[in-house]
Each structure stands twice: as C-alpha cells, then as structure tokens.
Image (tube, rainbow, N blue to C red):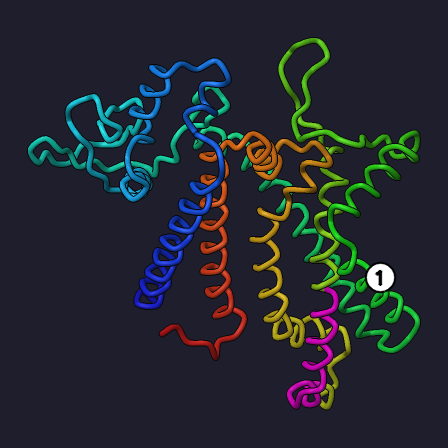
Amino acid sequence: MLVYLSKKIGYALITLFGVVTVIFFLFNFLPGDPARMMLGQNETAEQLAVVKKKYGFDQPLSQQYLYYLNDLSVLSLHAREPGSYTSYTPEKYGGLALLSMGDQVLILKWPYLRDSFQKGGKPVADVIGETLPNTAVLAVSAILLAIILGILLGVVSVAYKDQFLDRLIQLVSTIGMSVPSFFSALLFAWFFGYVLHDYTHLNMSGSLYAVDDYGQGTYIEWKNLLLPAVVLGIRPLAVVSQLMRNSLWDELSKDYIRTARAKGLGQFSIVFRHALKNALNPVVTAISGWFASMLAGAVFVEYIFGWNGLGKEIVDALNTLDLPIIMGAVLVIATLFIIINIIVDLIYGWLDPRISYQ
C-alpha cells in the first residue's frame, strides 16, 4: 500500500508540474501588461518601473517562471536583503525559516499563489479560500443528488427492464446527458424562479449566504442551493443511472447470482446484498470524474445563478484579466482532481478485493 501511494504521489507531482508549466506560459502570452492592469489607466513611468521590479515583471520570462516555481514550492529559497522580488518577508510568504546559506534563506511554507491584480492586492489564497467552500457545497450537493437518484433509477430500470418505466427513464437520461448545463441553468432559473415563483418561492439568482435586511450580518439561504444543485447534478445523474442499469443487469446474469436464486434468496436480497456492491465499480469511476469536473464545470452554473463560488470568481477574473486568480484557481482544481482520483483508486480495493495495490 505504501509503495502504491508513493508512486501515485510521484505521478501526481509530475502532473502538477506539467499543469503549472502549461498555465504559466499560456497566460503569460496573453496580451496586456500586468503592471498596467494593477495600476489602472493613470500610471506613470516611475510607477510602472516600481511595480515591475516588485513583482519580477522586469525579468526575462524564463526567470519569472523560476520565480513562480519557487513561490509554489513548499521549500523555497529567498534573498535576505529587501529590494528584489524573492526577498523574504513573513507578511508575504509566512512560513518558517529553516536554514541560512549566505545571502539566501531556505523556508518551509504553504504554496504562495501571489496577489490579485484587481482586488487591491488581496492574496489569491484568501480569494480562493472564501469562494471554494461555496463551490464545494454546491458540488457535493449535486453529486449526492446524482448518486442517490441515479442508483435508484438504475435499479428501477433493471426491475422493469424493457417496460414503459424503463424506457421512460432511459429517455429522460438521454435528454439529461444531451442538454448543456448553461441552457438548463437558464431554463430552470426562468421557469422555477420566475414563472412559478409564487408557488416555489425560489429566486432566479442568489448565493449560499444572504445579507440580513437589518444589517445584522449574513445568514445561510438554503433555498438558493436547490436550483443550481439540481442543474449541476442533471448530467451526472443521467450517466449514473445508465451505468447502474447496464452494470447491474450484467451482474445479475452471472453464475453466483444463479446460485443465490437456487438457494431460495429473494430478489430484494439478491440485488441489494450481493449484486449492487459488485455493480458499483463503473459507477464509482463515473462519480469520481464528474465530481472533479464539477469544480471546474460549475463556472457557468454559478455565474448564471449568481452563486458566489470559485466558478463565478474565475469568470470575473477572466473578464478583468486577473491572471493570478485564474492560475491559482486552475492549480487548486487540478490538485483536487488528482486527490479525488487517488481516493477513488483506494475505494476500488474496498469494492473489489481482487484488486491489489502494487
């Protein structure tokens, strides 16, 4: 197990290194001067020079790339003396100074995702920390909806295979997989939040936290979660129900199921105590992929419903070319995707004892 985890972590680090390299060079070839973005339209030549020196924009692109890797590394080298981008200050990097080497100091820290260009120099880590929990709540709610209803609909389809109910579920699943999320979001917001508002009391837009009318802080508005969670969960629900139906039907045709029937076990016991667990492998694969992609795919859903999550923050950052937020968000999503895949590989071993970790 430890050897397997070591290999997976090694592959994960290589993958993250590739992601970091791609997003750095991709976004640094976009038009626009980051220093001008930070200063606005009334900058002077002296101000531009100061900002470029402070953030390392006056260095060649290869040197800026090394600075970026140094910022993201848990162990990083920094200059002792102030005046350069790599100068170590606890306010900027935090962390713990481990070793002094001449005019350099080795520190242990959290990855530094830099500061926003447009939010008054606010650290990107703080921006992501404020928005990621909202996206996580939305993604978890959507995937739980997809898992519970998808598995139940798959079991019902097998129970009524090739009958009207089975065909109806397959039709609805096909439509659910075919309709883009942004179109579903617009349709649901208009129909349930506007046309039927007097009956549903749902809003066309709104986030998890709402501001109190009397200025007494914020409170959680759970009803604002319903529509975006349903919209985000439609496509994975359709996929899970289809996979559950096909996988469970294949499982029920195997020899050990025939043996269980010969012993007199009822259909309920056969399905839920024997076949269901073995039929979950392809479903777990689909769920892991969908859950990770939801963190990125929630962009349009969050923007349409006004949900203050990481997806909406990415759209706002793209509109203002706030590159540190975009790059930081992509890195966080890639990291979560890798972690989820490792967890899913471990779940396989629990679902299927025949799988060995080597």
Residue holding disc 1: 172
The quarter of the image holding the N terminus is bottom left
Which portion, as a residue range, is magenta? Answer: 241-260
Measuring 67% from the left and 81% from the top, which residue is drawn there? 251
Q: Nearer the viewer, residue 42 or 295?
A: 42
For label 1, count other residues whose C-alpha is less than 10 Å away and answer few (under 14), some (14-19) or many (20+): few
> Residue 279: x, y in percent?
64, 74
Q: Amino acid at mark 1?
A: Val
- The quarter of the picture where residue 210 lies is top right
> Residue 263: x, y in percent?
71, 88
Q: For the image shown, how many numbered marks are present on the structure?
A: 1
In the shown orientation, is residue 91 left or right of residue 152? left
User: Can residue 70 be found in the magenta stretch?
Assistant: no
* Image height of 342 relative to 320, above or below: below
Label 1 sits on a secondary structure element that is: helix
The answer to whether one can see residue 134 in this image is no
> Residue 225: x, y in percent?
71, 37
In the shown orientation, is residue 212 left or right of residue 291? right
The quarter of the image holding the C terminus is bottom left
